[in-house]
Structure formats: C-alpha cells, structure tokens
Image: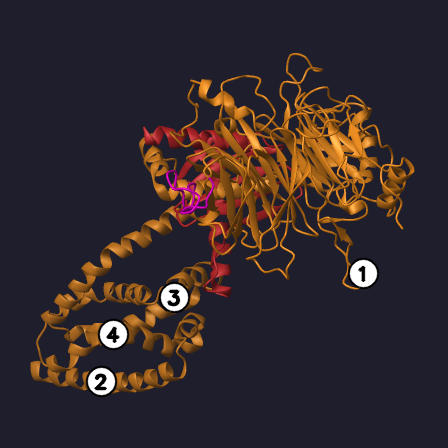
Amino acid sequence: MSSELKAQRAKALEEKRKKLEEMRARRNQRSAGTKTSVSAVSASKSGNLDEYIDGLLNSAPPIAPIEPVVAAPVAPSTPVSTAPTTPSKKVSKIDLMNEKTVSFAPTTTTTAEPSPAVKQVETFTISTQTDDLDFPMEESQHSEESNQEIAPTIEMSMEQEETKDEEPTLLSEDQVQEKIASTSFSNFFISASKKVERLLGAPLLQDLLVDDTIYYNDQESKRDASTSTETKDSFISAQVRFSCEKWTKERDVTSLDWSPHHRGEVLLASYGSSSSSANSTAVKNLNHNTNSASLSRSKTEMTGADGLAILWNLTMPSRPEHVFTCGSPVLNAKFHPSEGSLVVGACYSGQMVVWDVRSGRLPVQRSLWNLLGGTSSSKSHVHPIVGLEGLDSGFVSAASDGTVNFWSLANLMEPAETVVVPGANFSSLTVAPESNTLLLGDENGSIHAVLPSTSGGSRSSKRSIVKIYDSEKDTESLGHYGNVTGLATKPALKTDKDNNTVAISKGFARGAHGLVLSCGVDWTTKLWAPAYSEKPLLNLLSHSYDYMSDVQWSPVHPSVFATASSNGTLGLWNLATSLDEPITGLQGLLLDKNDSNMDEPSHGVNRIKWSRDGRRIAAACSDTVYVLGMSDELWKPKGNEGAKVMNALRGRGLIEAEE
Amino acid sequence: MATSAVMSEVEETLQRIKSHKGVEGIIIMTQEGSILQSTLTEEQSKQHGALISSLTEKASLMISTLDPDDKLSFLRVRSQKKEIMIAPDNDFLMMVIQNPNVVE
C-alpha cells in the first residue's frame, strides 16, 4: 500500500515539476518582455490567472527544495493544517516584494471586483496542495521562518485595514501630546496651516488687488470695518493691517520692500530692536538713540537676536510667512533681484546679511566685518547702514560715516567698490536709475550726489562727488535745515528701444523724469530738478507740522507721490493737479488710530513703499504695516501729466524753458 | 516644556484659522486616522475623519499613479454649501471646513 502510494505521489510530483518548469519558462519570457510586470499582475483579472500564479510562484522561495525530498514520508496531518495558511502568507509575501501591488491590490479587490481575489486564492490552494503534502520538515521550518518574517507586516497591514474601516479613534491626552511634540508634526503643522491660511486669506488679496473704486463707494457703508473712514479716503480702496504681536511688538519698522517675484503678493519689512517707549519717534535715524535707554527686554522668545525681518504674504495679515533674525537691528532689507528665495539685509552694525527662506531663521551669509581693521584692510561698513538700493549690477549701500559701498550680486561678502565722502554723515540714499547717480542725504541737511564714472564704464576710474546742496554754505537756506530723512527718484522709465534715451545733464535726467523729492526733519518736503538747478524748486509743507519721515514717487504715475509724517498721516500728492497741496487735503490720511481717541494718531508713519504696479502702498506705523489699496486715479495716468508738471514749473519760472 | 510651547503654538494657530470668515471646523489627524485636534464634536470629528482620510488616500494614490515622482500636497473640495481644504503630509493631515457663502 505504501509503495503504491509512493508511486502515486512520485507521479503527481513529476507532473507538478513539469508544470513548474513550463511556468518558469513562461515567466522568464514574460519578465524579459515586460519589466513593468507590476501593472500586468495587478491588471490581470481572471484571464491572466496563470501569469498571476507565475508571479506568486516566482517569489515564493519554498519551491526549490521540493525536488531533493521527493520520497520523504510526511505525516498526513501536517499538510492539512499548513495548506490553507500558506497561500495567504505567500500572497502577502508577494505583496511585500512588490510594493506597488500592495497599493493596487486592496483597491481593486475591495472596491470594484472582488472576484479575482477569490479565484486566485482558490486556484492556488488547489495546485499547491499536492506540493505541500510532501513537504518535509525542512520546508515547514522554512515556512516558519518566513512566517516570522511576514507576521509583523501582516499584523500591521491588518491593523491598517481595520483602522480604515473603523471610525477614527480619539487618542488619549498623552498620546496627543507625544504626537504633537514630534518634529514631523511641527513641520507638517507649519506648512499645512500656512497653506490653509493662504487660501482663507485669498479674499483679502482680492480686496487689495481688484481695484474698483465705484464698488467701494457704493458699498462704503458695508465696508467701514476694513476701510478707514469717510470721503477723504476715497483714494484708498482698502486697508489691511499687518502685525504679529509675538514678533513685531514695539519694534519699529525700518524699511519696506515689495517682492519682484511673487506678483506683488509678498512684502518684506525689516524691524529694528524693540523699544519700550510707547510713542516711538517715527524718524528712522533717530529712533535708535532711544535704545540705550531702554531697559526692558523684548518679550519675544528671541534672546540676543535684535534684528528682525519679516516676509508678509498679503493674504495672511497676522501670520508672518517667514521670520528672519540676526544679531543687529536691520535697518534696510531688500529682495534679491534675481533669486526669489534670498533676502538681503543691512544692519545697524554695518554688516550685510543674506537670508534664505529655505534654510531657516538665521542668515546664511554675513559680510566680512572687521571692527578693528582700518579702511585699507576691510572696506565693509563699520557704521549703521542707512541706505540700501538696488543697481543694475548689484546693490549700493551707504553708512552714516559717509562711506558708500558697491556690492556685486556674486559676492555679498565684500564690497566691490568703496567711495568715501569726507565729513559726511549720511542719513538716506536713493539712486537715479537712468544714470545710476547716487543721491545721498546728510544728517546736517546737505544733499550729495555721487556720479558714475564716465569713462566708458570702467570701474577703476573714480566716481565724482558733487554736493548739490550744502546746508552750511548756502545762506539762502532753501534746502533742508536738518536730517534729510527721505529721498526719492522716479523709477526707471519703461521706454521702448526706438524711443530716444533720456537726456542726462549733471548726472540726472532732464524733464519730468528727473525730478527728485526730499524730506526732512524740518517738516518740509522739497522738489528738486537737479538737471536744471541746484536749488529746490518747491517747498511743500502741508498735512503735517511735524517731522517728515519718508517720501516716494509713484512707480507708474508721473506726477503722483506720497509723503509720510511722524504725526501719523500719509499725504498723497498729484503735482499735475496742484503744486501746493496734497490731493488728500490738508489733514492727510490718518493711518494708525488711537483706540481711545479716534482723531489722535498713536504712532507716526515710519516708512512708505509703493508696490511695483503702483496700485498699493505699504506704510509702516511704528510696529505695524498697513497695506492700502489705491484707487485708479492714482495709478492710471492720463498720459500727459509729466509734461503738465514741467509746464507748470516753467510757468512759475522755476526752471528755464527748454531751448 | 517644549511640548507646552508647541501646544500653545498649535492652539494659537487653530484659533487664528478659526477666526477666518466662515470657518466651521478644523481637524488634525494622523494618516492612520487618529484624531489629534478637533474643533468639532467627537461624533462629527469621527465621521469627517473617516471620510476624509479615505478620500485623501484615494487622491494621493491617483497622483502617485499618474506620476510616481509626484505627491499630493493639497486637496480642495467645493460643494454648494461648503468648502473643505485638506493639507496632507507624510504622517499627518489637516482639514478645514469653511462655509464660503457666509456674509460678514
């Protein structure tokens, strides 16, 4: 009987072996033909069952030991018990080896067509049963081993499936704490909440971007929450307040810049160190004197980090998109003109720093800084950098000790060129884009011009320095009496090529485009035409009998500019309309309202900056940045305003008529 | 100490998100489906959580199937009454339900 049985088994095994060889051959063919067998396996429905089995056998290691142990007697009870379990194990093992199948298998089997899965299992069990009958101890050990390997993963996948089907669990307080404390959670949380807040804030962006004054006029009553007040604000279509108490509290904004890269959605603000005084002075260059007297430490989490620059996204008024810090108060910050992720900052210490949004809060680079070194060894600034402007080739910075450094974008570690104006104490800086002439305001009220080298652009030749207005020598006292806090030139003309280039004399463009504005602590804003005259043309004194802190031309409208006063008001002027009065009226626009008294300002305006398209203006009041949407009157020029202004000035005899 | 700082940061942010117009609820959960934070009731959270995690899984599968190098980063579902924003990550998932039709 036993010999009969043996013979039977041998026969069955022989058949089996043949079958296996056949299958292997076919499998080899297939794997050679299609490397991406994954999709083939998963896509195989009942029709490709053979292939599927091939796949299974392919990766099931126990096949090999079958042959040497043909005649080994096995207790008949063992295969019965192992048989039903092995197939499922093998399936999962295959799944393990083929990650893609894992992801595919559950979806296809559970949702759409459950039939293939069932069939597969059935066929497999039947065909392997004969195998398993003769499996010796060796094999069972083998499967045990693989059992152990597979076991945990099965459990895991089982768990996953269970949780998927079940309702989500509420974790215990400890578990929640543990999860939340993990770094992966905080990374996730920062990015996820930012995404969500960015979307939730989208209507805000719409308010600021979509300008429709008529709409706002009609719905004035509805919108009184966001727009400030009555009729005088008809120039302003929307107003949004940006501050984050945790970071910006009691830190005066020192500079503003709009991103050239993000369609005007991102705003950069730099902050000085915190001051305890409730009413900080608005004038940028004076407010640092209060620091030494200030004993209170900043309540923020920063220790020793005094410099702060924040990237604001217009959609998130209470959440800074990025926070940058450094050791010294940041007086100026600008976007890198070509690298969207870089921000360049100029510090009170004289250091230039570069931040990268990809690498965290601290600067990725600092300029070489040598306190002890004389001017010969280290050309970097050792005094507060009061001005930072972009040039075609890089940046130019001015420090309060009268040095001007030119930086190339390739190397912000060391200045490429240094110009020293003896005896000067700069307080402000601007660049005339046509000629790259620098205009520098002095703390004593003088204005200097640094003309670019004329000899064919060779860098070696000296730049010439001209004193446009000297407050000490000029007895007629037409210029500023004191600190020149702001200087403004018009942005580069977007002239097409065939248009003749702007005529330049004395380093400045002729015509309306060469008009320059300055403002100072003597309460005045002055209009200059340095191409024609070294005296100010107009002396504008309105909306503020207080220090003027900033002045800016509109980047798109030839006759519109804005002034900021430390009495908390903003003035908008259109020289084509009036050479004497701001269009916003004699009172100016009150930005930062005192909570107790609505007519009293709580803070002066430190800095203003038009967005690149001229449709918005960012204004900083102490530690808060306001972004104002402008009505189209202020950014839609009719076309002849520039000529109109020049005619008006000629009409007054302020500049001689063109030959 | 660090935990409490993170916790307060989390709560602060949730509060800020919640203060947006029309926001009805926020849920933060793990990819396995355990809820970490929720501003909804327990029942609502469980219901939303179960549905959202299966939806996110499908969406993420779709993206990775179309392009194995790609990854789902955000999911916005707009219905007549609601807008659901889902920000998934490797291990976690944030969901915000907003009623965009709310007038101030």
Q: Residue at x 83, y 28 (%)?
A: A581
Q: Quadrant of residue A11?
A: bottom left
Residue A485 x/y as whole percent: 64, 31
Could you tell whether A555 is left or right of B29 in the image? right
| Mark 4 vs mark 2, CA separation in Å | 12 Å
- Give the mark nearest the N terminus, 1 or 2: 2
Question: Which element is circle 1 on?
Answer: loop
Residue A247 x/y as whole percent: 48, 30
In the rendered image, the vertical position of residue A457 relative to residue A642, given as above or below: below
Residue A372 part of the magenta-drawn span: yes
Closer to the camera in the image, A526 or A87: A526
Residue B80 part of the magenta-drawn span: no
Q: Few, some or many C-alpha atoms within 10 Å of disc 2 (few <14, some 14-19, many ≥20)?
A: some
Q: Which residues are magenta?
A: A361-381
The amino acid type, in three-letter code, at marker 3 is Thr
Say which chain is red: B
Q: Quadrant of residue A318?
A: top right
Q: Dots 3 and 2: beta carbons under 8 Å?
A: no
Which mark, by number, is residue A499? 1
Res. A264 visible in picture: no
Main SS class of the magenta portion in the image? loop
Question: Disc 3 marks which residue?
Answer: A101
Q: Nearer the viewer, mark 1 or mark 4?
A: 1
Q: Few, some or many C-alpha atoms within 10 Å of disc 4 (few <14, some 14-19, many ≥20)?
A: some
- Give the mark nearest the N terminus, 1 or 3: 3
Question: Disc 2 marks which residue?
Answer: A17
